[in-house]
Amino acid sequence: MKYQDFKNKFKNTPFFRSTNLAQLPGSLQMLRNQLHKWKTQELVFQLKKGIYTLNKNDRHTRLDPLVLSNTLVSPSYISLEYALSVYGLIPEKIEVITAVSTKKTQQYSNIIGHFTYQHLKQAAFTGYIQKQADTYFYFMATKEKALLDFFYLNINQISDFEAYRFQNFETLNLKTLKKYLVAYNNKKLNTIVLNFIKYIKQQEYQSL
């Protein structure tokens, strides 16, 4: 198959999978060999094993990093530092896209960006919403759930809330925070959240 024909097949999709090669005419082994050749020529880039994208000039659809995050590991949803930054709960701009998954802790780096996934137990894998980027969708934690995931997965490091420069407390729904807290069933996390709520009230009092 000529690259031009291959490009025309996938130019309107942000990424494709190696399983999609079976839909193309010709020998599957020959197509795999050609795919390898196009990779070396940087016409095609591998995002992870079995997932690829055309080079930026030949791809007519934007590949959104947040959509890709959900694709690289499924099930997963964006959470932790990246989500906290998006929601304005911390001032830093986070470059690495952080997510949680019921699968093992892992990470990927490719031409689109850097992606990390931390394992979260099934019972706590909740509290995320669907968002849209162009015509594609991805999942991200609510601001309250992103905060709880952060506390839970850093449970032994959380001591001084000032160190994290949390901000915009007024945007948090404390009832929602407590509702999601139950899913973790963790006494230490309960204490951290209780202290955090006290910390929020202290900050609010000081700002009066």
Image (cartoon, rainbow, N blue to C red):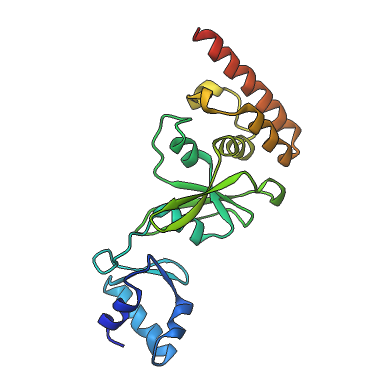
Q: In this picture, is 103 found above or below 41? A: above
Q: Which residue is at a point 47% across and 56% down the rendered structure image?
A: 137
Q: Give residue 65's quadrant in the image.
A: bottom left
Tell me which residue sits at (27%, 63%) in the image: 56
The residue positioned 65% from the left and 47% from the top of the image is 126
Frontmost residue, 60 versus 32: 60
Q: Is residue 73 above or below residue 36?
A: above
Asked whether 118 or 124 is in front, the reply is 124
Q: In this view, does 207 lie to the left or right of 144?
A: left
Residue farthest along the front direction in this orientation: 135
Could you tell whether 133 is left or right of 56 in the image? right
Q: Where is residue 32 in the image (x, y as percent from the top left)?
A: 40, 83
The one nearer the camera, 13 or 107, is 13
Task: Report x, y in % for residue 119.
Answer: 62, 50
For residue 76, say whether it is visible.
yes
Q: Is residue 98 above or below residue 170?
A: below
| Rendering coords of residue 1 (x, y %) | 31, 88
Estimate the x, y position of residue 43 in percent, counting from the top left: 28, 72
Q: In the current view of this chain or complex, which residue is farthest to the bottom? A: 27
Residue positioned 58% across, 53% down in the render: 105
